[in-house]
Amino acid sequence: MRLLIVESPTKSRKLREFLPADIRIAASYGHVRDLPPSGDLAVSFRDGRVLPTYAPLEKATRAIAELRSLAAQAEEILLATDPDREGEAIAWHLTELIGPHRYQRAVFHALTRTAVLDALNHLRPVDQHLVDAQQARRVLDRVVGWVVSPTLRRLGKDARSAGRVQSIALRIVADREREIAAFTARDYFTLTATVQKPEAPPPFQAHLAEWKGEALGHRLAAADVAEKAVAWCRKQPFIVGACDRREQARHPPPPFTTATVQQAASVRLKLAPDQTMKLLQELFEGGHITYHRTDSTALAPEAITEARMVISARFSARYLPEKPVIHATKAANAQEAHEAIRPTHADKGPDAAGATPAGKLHALIWERFIACQMASGRDELTTIDVHCAPDAWQGGPMGIFRAKGKVVRFDGWRKLGGDATDEAKPSGRSKAGKASGDDDEFTGQLPLLEVGQPLDLQNLAAVLKSTKPPPRYTQAALIKRLERDGIGRPSTYAAILGTILFRGYVVEKKRLLHASPLGLQVTDFLVRHYAGGFIELDYTARLEGALDQVARGERAWEPLVTAASRTVVTHAQNAGYRGDPLAG
């Protein structure tokens, strides 16, 4: 008998459908061993070694006893935990708990007959480099939490925890809170002209972009200036000064990664990141999607072939590009060995997982997977400059009004899911210091015009507006920021957000994240005492790069952890921490 160990009993039931009869399946029910949740640090540093003291988890007692009993009857043990560093570490912990035996690692990224049987034909040993990378992260998280958190207690009983990534996420929200508090709105006026070809409607609107040779971005600072400009312009001729038409390709978005599916599910389905992760787990264990903890946009050749077959069957020929679309992974520190998240059976359609919340998420994943292999869309962009008083200012126009139009000439991939390439627009507002409706927005179709053509002024008005503060983060936008800056791992984002919300450091109001007074106080304390260390925004990004080197076998994990821990402890001692866990 061969024993195959997975993490989830749900997964084991799915595997039973297509595994050979001589393979017995058992579940570890997740992690089986870890640093103890209470007591001392449980990590010692001696002679350049880092020695974690792991203990079996209480919740895993029954599972460990059953696995040991089954292992005693097995000729070979196949470790089929999840295909990431965490899964690799669980596999290693199982070998430590079960004891000497013949172990092989089975890695599959989808619960399908093809993927699983292929994994059984390509067994390998446990990858100690991946295990060491996970151990390094776990120990550093422990050191930061165990050493830094006590220094927060001077702030009061509610300031209970700090974390290597948690505190960075809090700082990003707190920094934005400070920006908003310091922001001073400025009123300004924008001039909007409604013009048309003589006796040839429809009219269109153009906004003041330049005045007396100066680029304004639609803004005149004072009311009297705006009123005088309106009065003067009403008496002047308007002509077409420039007309530019060009075609813009709108390329399909890449398939989902862990970070982008959390963002899209938040925006499109109003799901919190922790809800999304639970539903993804359900879909993976049900055999509906590939493994969902990934930061790669790569797709297997057979998956691309399947997507192209679906496109051919469901749409006309022009929606299928001549060659497969290859999407480059842009996430910092991405692990290219994984595939993107995709449906395991795209030919079954978006409704293969039903109408439940998990089914709606599956439909979103299916839609994105098919769209990523469809033809690019094409838009026609038109920019018209309308000159007011063409020769009244140093040989040029006194004012230039600008209109921008966009017309969809071919929808392409957008036929499936609209134009939601930006999953996490923070709150519908524009950038700090700008107001919605400024000159970067497009209207619909503009009329065909020629340079030099006169235009009739139908209306001209000065509109009072105010600059807006930088937008607050939503959970989706914060995840996008963390991913962009290479902070932490996408699979941990839901837990990170859950922690800062649970601790009361951040409060969510109408889907927007507000740093609480306690969160601001904690951030200020950490920045004051841990500057140059883990609280810096680029710290975890640099650390993730170092951990990737460990995972590839290019760097030893113990010197890395020792040096990083020493920095944390030194800062903590300056902040009032007593003791030195590295003294041994």
Image: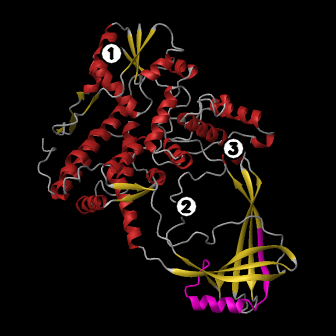
Stretch of the chain drawn in magenta: 216-244
Q: Nearer the viewer, residue 6 or 473?
A: 473
Left of 490 or right of it: where is 329?
Answer: right
Callout 1, which amino acid?
A: Leu
- Above or below: residue 79 compared with residue 75: below
Q: Secondary structure at mark 1?
A: helix
In this view of the protein, can residue 165 be seen by the observer?
A: no
Where residue 475 appears, as percent x and y from the top left, is 45, 51
At x 20%, y 55%, the residue is 152
In terms of image quadrants, where is residue 400?
bottom right
Residue at the right extreme? 199
Cα–Cα gap, marks 3 and 1: 47 Å
Where residue 381 appears, as percent x and y from the top left, is 74, 63
On-image quarter of the N terminus: top left
Q: Nearer the viewer, residue 41 or 556?
A: 41
Q: Secondary structure at mark 2?
A: loop
Q: Earlier in the sequence, mark 2 or mark 3?
A: 3
Left of 226 or right of it: where is 513?
Answer: left
Does residue 313 show up magenta in the picture? Answer: no
Cα–Cα gap, marks 2 and 1: 52 Å
Q: Which residue is mark 1?
A: 67
User: Could you say which disc has been placed on residue 416 in the image?
Assistant: 3
At x 25%, y 42%, the residue is 142
Where residue 178 appears, as percent x and y from the top left, is 36, 67
